[in-house]
Image: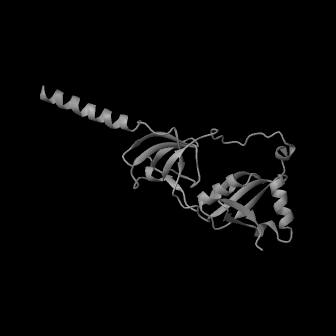
Amino acid sequence: MLRIYIKVIISLLFMTVSLSATADGPDYFSIRGVAYNDVLWMHPKPDYKSPRIQGIPPNASCVKNMGCYKRWCKVSYRGVIGWVNGKYLGEGGCAQSYKSTPKKQKSSYYNETIQQTMKLPQLTWGACMLICEDNKFCKKADYNSQTSMCTLSINTSHPNYQRIVQRCSHIPSSNWSASYQNDRWQIGCPN
């Protein structure tokens, strides 16, 4: 009888722990306190020694709260679920859900199929993803961790890209670079 009583108590304790991981809090988080050139790593369990699943950019929002346990929070970001250190999370919102394919725009500028790739060396994964998010003419970003090379698929007919082309016409686009200014990544040419 004592064994049954102990099993019931242990079961109730585990239920309490699992319930605390779905406790109150915001529906969505924003990332706070992560350096602009770094990422917040997601892990399969609430332990920094566990493998890294995916990085979340330092200015990300729309990070779905799936519950917290102690200082760790289980989150969903762009379809990937994992645990992150809660000290880097702040209350946030989510205006729209992430879609892996770009939205179709009404303007003819965005429907053009003219595309090329731009390679930017010596960047982190987080910086590569943010460059694409901050520059509307970028359709997709790929990152090679072995070479630290960021490859952007860009829409060359986008008006923002055309402005850079005019401003940097004296330098080949292979020599353009990315810099972090005014809280966003900008692509341009060295002066």
Provide residue 12's location: percent of width, then percent of height.
27, 31
Q: Residue at x 76, y 67 (%)?
A: 176
Residue lying furthest left: 2
Q: Which residue is drawn at 70% across and 59% down?
A: 151
* Count of all numbered marks drawn on residues in the image: 0
Provide residue 130's location: percent of width, then percent of height.
64, 55
The quadrant of the image that shows the N terminus is top left
- Give the quadrant of residue 191: bottom right
Q: Residue at x 86, y 71 (%)?
A: 170
Q: Which scheme is used to colour this image of the protein?
A: one colour
Say if 94 sits above or below 136 in the image: above
Provide residue 68's location: percent of width, then percent of height.
41, 42
Residue lying furthest bottom: 191
Provide residue 67's location: percent of width, then percent of height.
43, 39
Out of 134 and 77, give the one closest to the viewer: 134
Give the side of residue 140 with respect to residue 125, left or right.
right
Q: Which residue is drawn at 77% across and 54% down?
A: 154
Give the side of residue 78 with respect to residue 165, left or right.
left
Say if 9 sits above or below 145 in the image: above
Give the side of residue 89 with respect to residue 130, left or right.
left
